Image (cartoon, rainbow, N blue to C red):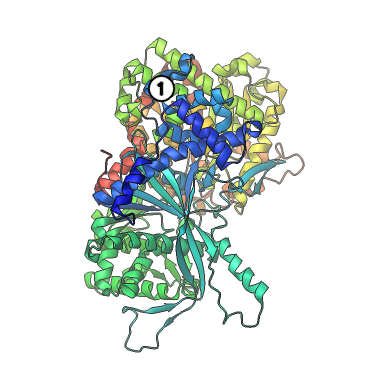
Amino acid sequence: IETKIPAQSREVWNKHKVQKFSTAEEFEEKFISHVEWTLARSLYNCDDIAAYQATSQSVRDNLVIDWNKTQQRQTARDGKKVYYLSLEFLMGRALDNALINMRTDTSTHDVGSTDETLTKGNTSREMIRNAMKQLGFKLEDVLEQEPDAALGNGGLGRLAACFVDSLATGNYPAWGYGLRYQYGIFAQKIINGYQVETPDYWLNFSNPWEIDRWEIQVPINFYGYVDRSDKEKTTISPSDWIGGERVLAVAHDMPIPGFKTSTVNNLRLWSAKPTTEFDFAKFNNGDYKNSVEQQQRAESITAVLYPNDNFDQGKELRLKQQYFWCAASLHDIVRRFKKNKKPWSEFPEAIAIQLNDTHPTLAIVELQRILVDLEKLEWHYSWDIVTKTFAYTNHTVMQEALEKWPVGLLGHLLPRHLEIIYDINWFFLQSVEKKFPHDVDLLSKVSVIEEASQERYVRMAFLAIIGSHKVNGVAELHSDLIKTTIFQDFVKIYGANKFTNVTNGITPRRWLKQANPKLAELISETINDPDDDYLLDMSKLTALSKYAEDEAFQTKWNDVKQFNKLRLADLIKHLNDGVDIIDREHIRNTLFDIQVKRIHEYKRQQLNIFGVIHRYLSIKELLQSGASIEKVAERYPRKVSIFGGKSAPGYYMAKLIIKLVNSVAEVVNADTEIQDLLKVFFIPDYNVSKAEIITPASDLSEHISTAGTEASGTSNMKFVMNGGLIIGTVDGANVEITREIGEDNIFLFGNLSENVEELRYKHQFSNPGLPEGLVKVLNALESGAFSPQNSSEFRPLIDSIKHQGDYYLVSDDFDSYIATQDLVDQVYHKDKKEWLKKSILSVANVGFFSSDRCIEEYAETIWNAEPVKPE
Ligand code: GL7
């Protein structure tokens, strides 16, 4: 590796090599020096926030040493590099995760505490807990100071976060590229039952986890025109794009530590800054103030994350974000490649770029532009490099989520790119015409340009397919669906081999070890794995199977669940202004039924809350018929129904569902007649750090999307990994979860995806009578039972079922949902041993859903990339 330092000076450098802390003593020293030097504080004004900052800075110092070594090693070994382009990285908190992942050689020093539970495992986390205690702080309180890095909406963004964890853990030379939004996903407040959005300015305190790379600045152009004065030049020859507006992309790096390895990878996030260049011609009227203001607007590009999940809003600023990020990342990747002075033909052997959904599709166009316009390579030669480099992951089949940009808008912002898109399309359509002569219909169906309406649109998914060598879905059912629905014509053109499946996964470090330390401890103790190797090889969990019916073990297992339920009950009490709605005494016999995820009609929180209303009405009916509360409890045993999730700010129906949940909670929780047989709570501001408390506490979680709509789901995997059972439809990864853990251990219900189309079709013409139970629920809603001030408040929810075709098939699945909920009650309350057995067997067989497995599949089948292991 090259260096500017002359040979004779290197001795000095080596003599003063920086060192990682490895003992509690050394950590304390670091901590104090960061309090003094980095924070300019002291013993006398060090609060929990300062302690969080100093701890993070100290841990980061260790990571940076490994980060540097990792980057040198990966450069020297020159293996294939993987770049994961994602507009969202829903990272959550970093400190606790770093403490878990960087556990290393601390065993001989880790004896500070006399408390047995604290020294167990000899991890750096325990060592630091002790050291913090010595310094006068409680680790848990300090960890709470960290704001979530909430740079994502939901599953898609959290998947990217799990992936970077697994890439580092698997020692892959891999970087993530994203945007450093100043405002992550909004914080959700519930006011009078309604969602209110407030800005998430997460960088209020300085962020110790980012390293600002002010020296890495990439100029990015927008608007302008293509110089076509040279009539010899066609659009496929090198062209000059004369940019109009120019902003700078500045790099900010986040170290991503692998688990039990010294590999620390990089997540590079770009922020937009004004250039120092000044366009005198533009401002020759002397309007200095205006010109400064115009420059300032640069920063708005990375100001805010668009808060839509599974929905394409088509705003110009969003397209600007996309190009800004793709261009900066591509420039960075190409710059690093060129240092090696390899021929361009080796680009695809050196680099794999994975597109997380269609959001980074412009990267395909940008690489073609770099090769043709800047590197002056021939069009087809360039295109061959491009298609061998990129691969595209599809995450949804829902029409409203498929990105398309008006041709006019795209051409105005990126005139040269639109030309390139036209030419890509032209050559593609020619190849189709050759293979399927005179099939005009096919040509219009697969064209990148949609001409159906008055506006013409660029279809980003089609462009992504054409520019990639592999396209994958995220669960088996979903990957099959894309081949038979939205991309079926492309299967005809390219053959089925271009399309593949990689079922999603989650990192067990965060979602088991970090979120559920008690369960992790019980597991490592039971399977005799004190070093937690099972977190790297989840097939080790199958050793739990033999204890599935062991009574003593079941008791321990259940105790862990109780602990986690109490932890959640505490959180709920805290969020409910100190008012406890959950009866602690009966918590062991109270079923925690949880649905936390983005609020969306297709995810069917409305089905869940209708089920809750149905239960409430049934309890009331029984009581009114004279049954004693004990008798009623036999039929409808204790249950807490917990909801959580954000709605897109402009999504009216989703917001109405949130209001309904809160209105039902108000009525049900205040009804003393039913005692505590039923409680309902909506957890405000669901996010990653809350998920870490909520997920381990579920007895049952709900994954009840209309079949064929949820591409995969990943929280389903998280709940199973924490010993919760699932009630779910035959959708997304639920299918493979069933295969892995066994159909006896999951509560499936509802129509299958192959029947959805027909059912929807029927709804259009006839109105088959609604199920009796649902009619009762809708009548109660109509009567204003949950909205006394405004009995028509929930009318739109009723209408969508009764009069608008019930697109999400709530009525079709209602009875089967209620019957399955009854079955859940039966097993949970009448046969606890059976329940615990199911829970244990689920965890024993959840190994497949580790994101490590998932990343290995990408590496082998899509990227052809190998790990670069530390010596
Ligand atoms: C999603 C899917 O809806 C979800 O089912 C999947 O688990 C996730 C990750 O693959 O991707 N697609 C999508 O557009 N969003 C998702 O969460 C926002």
Residue closer to the observer: 735 or 532: 532
Q: Is residue 492 visible?
A: no
Residue closer to the observer: 228 or 720: 228
Residue closer to the observer: 337 or 158: 337
Tell me the quarter of the image containing the C terminus: top left
In x, y percent, where is residue 207?
54, 45
Residue closer to the observer: 16 or 208: 16
381 versus 309 height, above or below: below
Residue 469 lies left or right of residue 115; in this view the side is: left
In x, y percent, where is residue 10?
32, 48
Q: Given the current orientation, which residue lies at the most extreme front position?
A: 8
170 versus 522 height, above or below: below
Q: Is residue 474 visible?
A: yes
Taking the spot 44% from the left edge, 64% from the top edge, the residue there is 218
866 versus 427 height, above or below: above
Q: Amino acid at mark 1?
A: His
**SS for callout 1:** helix
Task: Assess disc 1: are there few (<14), some (14-19) or many (≥20) residues with their C-alpha within 10 Å of its C-alpha.
Answer: some
Residue of label 1 = 109
Residue 48 lies left or right of residue 404; in this view the side is: right
In x, y percent, where is residue 234?
33, 83
